[in-house]
Structure formats: structure tokens, C-alpha cells
Image: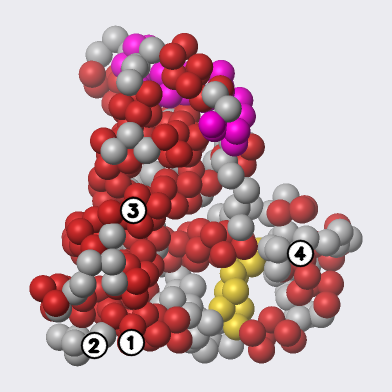
Amino acid sequence: MPEVRSPKTLLRLIDESGGAFAVIEDAVEALRLQVADLKPGDPDAVQVLRHHLLAIGSPSDVAKYFSVELLCRLAPERAVSTFLEVVEQLARSPIQPDRTYPVERAMIRQLGEREVTEALPALAVLAAREVYPLSRTAARAVAKIVGSTDQDVITDRLKRDDLPEASKPQELGAGVNRALWPNRKSSSARSSQERRRRITQENAETPPDSSQTCLRPEGKAARQRRLRALLLGAGRDPSRCGNCGNPGRTQIGHLLPPLHGGSDRPGNLFAFCGPCRRRLPRGRREAFEDHAPVAVAPEEAEAQLDLFG
């Protein structure tokens, strides 16, 4: 059983571990043991819970339900902003088609029930991806916030000036409509399920272009969180250097840079600690770091797998 430690100590341990998920889980369990003593709005406890919920690739759904409930109790406003971060991260990421994401869908439903207008673009993008059951849950949240299931009404709402990041509103409105009524092209429940399964397999791995053009710009910290979650979902430890194997703070980057067609699939992602990253030749180091894309020659881009070559 984890030792009972203060939220501040738990957050420090998470930071020192480089966000290792095992440390996050232990911290959440430690919070559970002292839940009666936690003060509303405790900033350190809130950050521990936020770390847990943003680790989307983790399988600990039961523990995450606790984090959702406790975060809503301690800091309702921070809960909403965290749920919004989760939805935006999902909208930009490859999704595991064999997972149903029950906790993430619970957060999406809360955004809908609370009618969080700021979440509309991300929810619409996720609905339009047609990755079920996530997309249908997101579409229903959109309809709840807008107050209508009519495609034209949803499209009109996405056009308003208070949502400047929601480009391509017609495309998004049509996508929400498809997710709301996935049975219309099928003659039976069985064929409808088969169709949804096929569409999910086709759409899960590659987010559409709208995930970048319709959402707010993704900052470096948010991008690192998303890439770490992708590695975690693939069964890899993003807090352990992929070169030397040491645990601690790492930076996630691409073996083949996005500039040359590299994707965000886990097989193209690599975690480097600071010392190993600094050992890279300058050109490869800059290409690896997602915040500083450079024009690497095509033959060098093909050699990214041999980073120290």
C-alpha cells in the first residue's frame, strides 16, 4: 500500500520521474487514502489528478473514474478544462480501435451536460472522425451543447465568431450528423454494427486534416503530453530513454520527421533523455525535436532510424 504523502510531495515525485505512469498511479492511490483530508481547490492534488486523466493510453479505467469524481469535487472549473484537454488530445491522436474509452466518454458526456461551448470544435472533430463509440458520444455532446440534432443548426453554431478556431464548419456539421445517425445506411442492426466496426478500423489510426485546421494551435507541452500518451498506449514507457534505458525526464520526438511524411504512430516515436539527445548530430537533433522542424535532406531523413550513425 502506498505511503500517505502530501499532494505536494506526490507531485514532486511525478515530476522527478519524468511523468512515469507507475508513479502517477501510486500518487493517485495515495490521494485516495487521504481523500477525506484533501482541501477543495488543492492545486497540487488537482495537478496529480490531471496527470492521471491526460495519460490517455493507460488501461487503468477504474482508477480514472476515481480521478474524474475527485477532480470534479475538488476543483470543478479545473475539471472542465482538463476534460477539454483530453478531448483535444483524442481528436489529434491515433485511437486504438479495440478500446471503448469509457472514462474519456464519461468526460465527454460531462462537457455536454455542462454545455461547455469552448469544447464544440474538438467534440465536432472527434465526432467527424467516425471512430465508434467515441464519435457517437462526442456527437451527442455537440447536440446537447447546441440544443439541436439538426445538421444545419449545428453547422451554423460552428460558424459563429465565438469559435474562430472552428474552420470547415460544413464538413464538421456533416461529420456530426453521420455520427449521430450511423444506422441510416444500413438495413439491419447487424449490418450497422459491421459497418461501424469497418469504419472505425479505417479511421482510427490517422486523424483527419481537420484535427489540425479546426482546433487551437497545439503548444509544445500539449504535444509532448499527447505523444507520451501514444507511447503509453502502445505498451512503451515514455519516461524511460529509448537509447540508454535510464528512467527520468525524456523528450518524445519522431524518427522520421513529420516534415518528410513521418506520422505520430508509436512506431515512429522515440523517447530520449537529455544527455542522449545532446549526443545526436545537430541536424538530426533538430529534426528529432518537434518544436524546431528543419529541412533535412531526404537521404538523411531516411536514415533517422540510425540516429547516432
Q: Secondary structure at mark 2?
A: loop
Choose mark 4 or mark 3, whichever is in front: 3
Question: What residue is drawn where x is 39% and y is 44%?
Answer: 97
Q: Residues within 10 Å of mark 2 (few under 14, many from 20)?
A: some
Question: Which residue type does callout 3 highlight?
Answer: Glu
Is residue 245 found inside the magenta-colored segment of the image?
no
Separation of marks 4 and 3 at Cα, in angstroms = 33 Å
Type of colouring? secondary structure
Which of discs 1 and 3 lies nearer the camera? The answer is 3
Q: Amino acid at mark 4?
A: Ala
Q: Residue furthest left?
A: 36
Return the disc, 4 or 2, that comes first in the chain's sequence.
Answer: 2
**Residue drawn at the location 24% of the way across and 21% of the way down:** 190
Task: Judge from the rendering whether residue 4 lies leftward or rightward of residue 288; answer left or right.
Answer: left
Tell me which label, 1 or 3, sits earlier in the chain. 1
Identify the mark at residue 292; answer none if there is no mark: 4
